[in-house]
Image (spheres, rainbow, N blue to C red):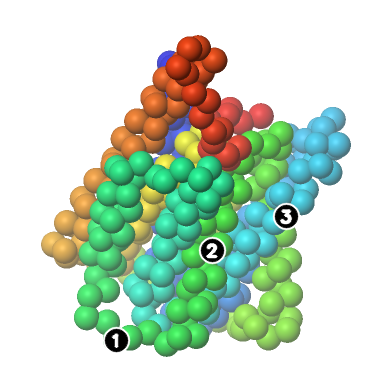
Amino acid sequence: MVEAMRRHVGLGLIAMLASCAAFGTSGPFAKSLMTAGWSPGAVVLIRIAGAALVLAPFGLWSMRGRWGTLRSELPLAAFYGTLAVAAAQLGYFQAVSRMPVGVALLIEYLGIIIVVLWVWALTRRAPHRLTGVGIVLALAGLALVLDVTGQSTPSLVGVLWGLLAAVGLAGHYVLAGRPTALPAVAFAGVGLTSGAVVLALAGLIGVLPMEAGASTVVIAEASAPAWVAFAELVLVAAALAYVLGILGARHLGSTLASFVGLTEVIFAVAFAWVLLGELPGLIQLVGGLVLLSGVVAVRLGERDEARAASHATTHAGTPGGHDEPARPDFEVHSPVA
C-alpha cells in the first residue's frame, strides 16, 4: 500500500513538473505574437480553442462505451473550464493590461493560499505547521523570482482582475484533483472546450479585445511564421500542459499540486533566458531556491499529516482510539481511469 502511494506521488510529481515546463514555454511564444500585433485575447482564445480541437479525438476515443459517465461528469468538467481556464486567463490578461506583469502574476499565485484555506474550511483542521512555513517560503521565493520589489501601487481594478485569476488558479488545483471517472484527456478536452466558449463570448461582447497581427513573428532572434508560435502554444503550452497538469493533480492532491505548480515560474524564466536572452539575475536564482524549499516544506507537512491520519485510523475503534475526520475527496491519491 505504501509502495503504491509512493509510485502515485512519483508519477504525479513527474507529470506536474512536465506540465509546469510546458506551461512555462508559453511566455516567449505569446510575447512574439503580441509584439507582432496580436491582442492577448486573440492569442489566448486561439490557444485554448486549438487545444480543445487537438484533444477532441483523443477524448472521444477514451470515452468509447462510457457516454453515461461523460453525461454525469459533464457539469464538473464544464465548471473546470469556466473557472480554471476562462476565468484564470481572462482575469490575468485584464490585470496585465492595468499593471506590471510581475505584480499580476504575484496576485494570481495567491490562488495557492485559497487552496489551503479551502481545504482548511472543508476539513476544519488547520494546515500542518510545515505547510504554513511552505506558504511563507513559496510566496517569498515567488516575489524574488518575479522581482516585483519597488513597483508602484497597482490599480484597484487591476487587483480585482488579478484576484479573479487567483480564484481561477485555485479552481484548477481543486477541481483537477477531484476523483472522477473521466480520463484526464477527456476531462481536459471538455474543460478547454467550455473555456473556449466562454472566452469567445467575452470577445463577442467586447470584454476581451480580439485583434489579429502580422503573419510573421521573431523567436530566438529568428523570423518564423505566426502559425509556428500558435502551434507551440496549442500543442505544448495548452493541450499537453493541461492533460499533464490534471494527471499530476489527481495523483498529488490539490494542496501539494498547487505548490509544485509554482515551479512554472522557474521554467518560464529559464525558457525566456534560452529563447529571448533574458538572463535571470542573482535575486531570481535565490528566489527559485527559496520557492523550491517551500515546496519541500509542504511535502513534508503532508507526509506528517498522512502518517498521523494512518496512525489514528489504525487505533480507531480500539480502547482509547479516536476517529479522525475524513479528508476531502479531492485530496485522495486515486489513479486516473
Q: Considering depth in this image, is 83 or 244 the residue closer to the camera?
A: 83
- Which residue is the site of mark 2? 167
Q: Amino acid at mark 3?
A: Ala
How many labels, in total? Answer: 3
At label 3, counting other C-alpha atoms closer than 10 Å, the crowd grade (few under 14, some 14-19, many 20 or more) is: many
Disc 3 element: helix
Q: Is residue 188 visible?
A: yes
Residue 146 location, x and y as percent? 29, 67
- Which residue is the site of mark 1? 152
Question: Does residue 129 appear to the left or right of 186 in the view shown?
Answer: left
Tell me which residue sits at (62%, 80%) in the image. Answer: 208
Residue 169 location, x and y as percent? 51, 59
Residue 318 location, x and y as percent? 50, 12
Disc 2 element: helix
Q: Is residue 49 visible?
A: no
In the displayed structure, would residue 46 be above or below residue 316? below
- Which residue is the site of mark 3? 78
Q: Considering depth in this image, is 264 or 29 the residue closer to the camera?
A: 264
Which tag, 1 or 2, sits closer to the chain's start?
1
